[in-house]
Amino acid sequence: MRKILLPALLFISCFELTAQADVAKLKEKAAAAADKMEAKTIAWRRDFHEYPELGNRETRTAKIIAEHLKKLGLDVQEGVAKTGVVAILKGGKPGPCVALRADIDALPVTERGDLTFASKQKTTYNGQEVGVMHACGHDTHTAMLMSVAEILAGMKSEIKGTVKFIFQPAEEGPPEGEEGGGYLMVKEGVMDNPKVDAIFGLHIWTHIEVGKIHYKSGSLMASSDWFTIKVKGKGSHGSQPWAGIDPIQVSAQIIDGLQAIVSRQSELTKAPVVITVGKIHGGVRNNIIPEECIMDGTIRTLDSDMQKEVHKKIKLTAEKIAEASGATAEVTIDTKTLVTYNTPELVKKMLPTLQTTVGANNLVETEWVTSAEDYSYYGTKAPSFFFFLGGMPKGKDSKTAPPHHTADFYIDESGMKTGIKAFCDLVFDYMNMK
Ligand SMILES: [Zn+2]
Ligand SMILES: [Zn+2]
């Protein structure tokens, strides 16, 4: 028995070592290709940056993406979730289906600064004339994924499985009254046919130095809900409040009550909760108590059960506080994104990969983030891993780096190579692990 076992074990471990060496060679080849095509990646990014398009309106961007993917010989689907593009690369060998996702939309922000490729685009947004800017770095995501597609298409015969490239519109939210984004991509079946076994996504981050990757297992980014509370009272003269029911004063109590949900009713050691009232409107004149006051706000949670609990509590708090004063409160809550959840088993399995891509010192475990991502919807359909990629120039202070969504937002383009290599390495390792 022992005599047979030992050679068998030796054979298996030799086989594994050879397989590992083969994968390492693939990664080297992909990395060399990423370096070689850096100028092309940058040129794509600059073009998208100069001509940004808002959510569900990314027709020029989508056309450039689709033409490139078709040239690579991929099976390309256009018009997914309005302006999305999905491409399938069938490898030369059988294996799992790995999806990679990039978002392609820009924001209604007027760009400042003197980049030669700065955006001069303008549009009307919510009735206002505004500039359009890639102020969240989605231009880099698009350019990176186009590069990954080119590299992997060039290595087709060595790929064990299928790669699905997802170029998603409207991550920042569709225009009012329209559906869109990750939610609609999933609804239109992007995770099926072929069924995705694992999905990876990244976000370039202006507060992380280039060459670094930040990750977190489990919840990473918050769910985002938008809420409106309409308080109805009774109008009266400002000098005689007892003759009416003051919806402004009731709203003030409700705002206080909402903060008590965070500070007194939520188990904050489990996960953070944020409730913000960002807009309040009621009344037209100083001595008139109006009939109505309307508040708009956002809720952020990092645990989906807590998200549901907070919804119930906001409703109860607003309604009961209003009732105590003889007013009514009507609460509507609209879920924009879910919690971006990184499947712990997948993260554990793939961390050595990222460690090899960037080096142990450059792979950093991060904290919860209370901003949100509609990438979260893909995670409801397959094991998922989303991480942050460094986009801040080396030596800069992360505290003073202009934040995402602002006019001075800036990305060091040399960070894109790392993202391309990370995606390629994840694909190769995942496919060879199964
Ligand atoms: Zn954004
Ligand atoms: Zn973004």
Image: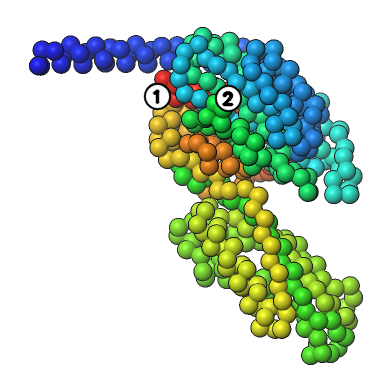
Classify 154 as above or below 325.
Answer: above
Q: Residues within 10 Å of mark 1 (few under 14, many from 20)?
A: few
Q: How far, Cα to Cα, is label 1 from label 2?
A: 17 Å
Observer-nearest residue: 428 or 24? Answer: 428
Circle 1: element type: loop
Mark 1 or mark 2, earlier in chain: 2
Q: Is mark 1 within 8 Å of ligand 2?
A: no
Task: Point out residue 246 in the picture as x, y percentages from the top left corner.
Answer: 78, 81
Q: On the rendered structure, is 409 left or right of 91?
A: right
- Classify 397 as above or below 271: above
Between residues 55 and 115, which one lies in front from this camera angle? Answer: 55
Query: Is residue 147 among the parts visible in the rendering?
Result: no
Q: Amino acid at mark 1?
A: Lys
Q: Position of residue 84 (x, y in %)?
A: 70, 31
Q: Which residue is mark 2?
A: 164
> Few, some or many C-alpha atoms within 10 Å of disc 2 (few <14, some 14-19, many ≥20)?
many
Q: Quadrant of residue 295?
A: bottom right
Locate the C terminus by quadrant.
Answer: top left
Q: How is the image coloured?
A: rainbow
Label 2 amino acid? Lys
Q: Secondary structure at mark 2?
A: strand
Q: Residue 59's image quarter? A: top right
In which quadrant of the rendered view does residue 245 lie?
bottom right
Relative to 312, 176 lies left or right: right
Q: Kindly identify which residue carries mark 1.
A: 434
